[in-house]
Amino acid sequence: MTTEGQAQNGRQPLTCKAAVCFGPGEPLQLTDVVVDPPKEGEVRIKILYSALCHTDEFTRSGADSEGRFPCILGHEATGVVESVGEGVTTCEVGDLVIPCYQAQCLEGDLKGRKCPMCVGYEKHKTNLCGKIRAFTGQGVMAADGKPRFTLKSDGSPIYHFMGTSTFSEYTVCHQESVAVIAPDAAPEKVCLLGCGVATGLGAVWNSANVEPGSTVAVFGLGCVGLACIEGAKHRGAKEIIAIDLNAQKFELARQFGATKCVNPADHGDRPIQDVIIELTDGGVDYSFECIGNVKVMRAALECAHKGWGVSTVVGVASGEISTRPFQLVTGRTWKGSAFGGWQSRAEVPKLVQMYLNNEIKLDEYISHRMQLSDINEAIRLLHAGDGIRTVMKIASE
């Protein structure tokens, strides 16, 4: 990493390496970018480790309607605060942090501004803080409506992604998106709590609120699906059915707590929901779709038990979902979960502490370790279904 005119308190731009996506469907290019100093209410972070998530690939592929190019992807990471802008009160230089794509307002934030949704989540009705959402959705910062990244070669703007952009040695986030965590946490492991593992655990614990003795079906055995299985086991579910087309994932699913594994390919043209209904004598109490496939979302709903079954959509998809209204009229609930319902800055540090207390897994999700320069190989592995999570080293500690 090189610096350019770095002055005290991080008030000058930095030049660093980043994996830039210049257009939908294009491979990422490791190139030099300039990262501006943080403005009011912003935090500049040195990214240590970042994992690759399906949502990164969803946007890179061009399927994301909010995708804006060129951009720097990445949203599941750990880093160290390098500098802070004026008005930042909730973190300081040297803090170990997890950038959180789902923001959260706190009382100490700049000028006390809050979004209307915060009234809801203060009553624990939602975690969907909208204070900076209009800006992060456009890849810019709230202070001036501009990105903090430019291409070193020509000064052209590079847009942010999900308010995090962690495939860069340095990034700038709103302070609402920065969770300060225990300084003794292993950054190469707890980065998974920036999305995948936190999302799966929270979908089970917060969004669906799975009860002891329940029957559960999990569609998709990637990181999020395995975290749903872990969460269901933690809650005392009596039966956990793991569903995936890749039978090589079944052994790991059993290690996480699955009691049955089902491959839809083994059942020909028979709808998988019918298979699950038969296995469970009427359907499951809770189902989770962790793939991002609208047809699977329907199957997950329709395998939920009539009268009380709850199906939670966790995966991200660009298509529209559909089912017969009778499925809902007869008592099933269809709901969604964003970031597992966690209030990011308040609760991600608690998840980190749970890991430090050996109450949740993280190590077992990591299948590959790479450098940022290997990002396109990590994407290839993702498409091949090879492994669970690839963690990349971004900058030196």
Image (cartoon, rainbow, N blue to C red):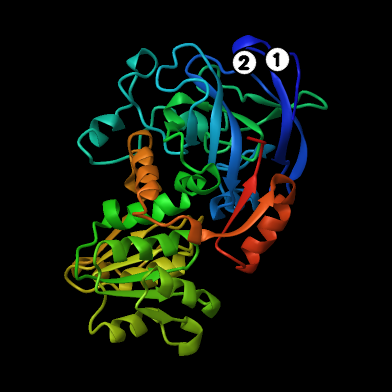
**Is residue 238 toward the left or the right of residue 196 in the image?**
left
**Is residue 233 toward the left or the right of residue 163 in the image?**
left
Give me the residue at 64% from left, 54% from top. Answer: 369
In the image, residue 146 lies at what x, y percent?
A: 60, 22
In the image, residue 315 lies at what x, y percent?
A: 45, 58
Q: Nearer the viewer, residue 338 or 242?
A: 242
Give me the residue at 33% from left, 25% from top. Answer: 106
Up-down relation of residue 118 to residue 232 (above or below): above
Find out whether the residues at labels 1 and 2 contact each other: C-beta distance under 8 Å: yes
In the image, residue 81 lies at what x, y percent?
A: 54, 26
Spatial separation of the CA atoms under disc 1 and disc 2: 6 Å
Give me the residue at 48% from left, 64% from top. Answer: 293
Which labelled disc corresponds to residue 6? 1
Q: Secondary structure at mark 2?
A: helix
Query: Which amino acid, by three-letter code, is at mark 2?
Result: Gly
Which labelled disc corresponds to residue 219? none
- Residue 325 visible: yes
- Quarter holding the N terminus is top right
Give me the residue at 55% from left, 55% from top. Answer: 54
In the rendered image, which quarter is residue 387 located in? bottom right
Up-down relation of residue 372 to residue 377 (above or below): above
Q: Nearer the viewer, residue 298 or 361?
A: 361
Query: Which amino acid, by three-letter code, is at mark 1?
Result: Gln
Look at mark 2 in the image and give the residue it sits on: 10
- Residue 336 visible: no
**Is residue 236 toward the left or the right of residue 40 in the image?**
left
- Quarter holding the C terminus is top right
Q: Secondary structure at mark 1?
A: loop
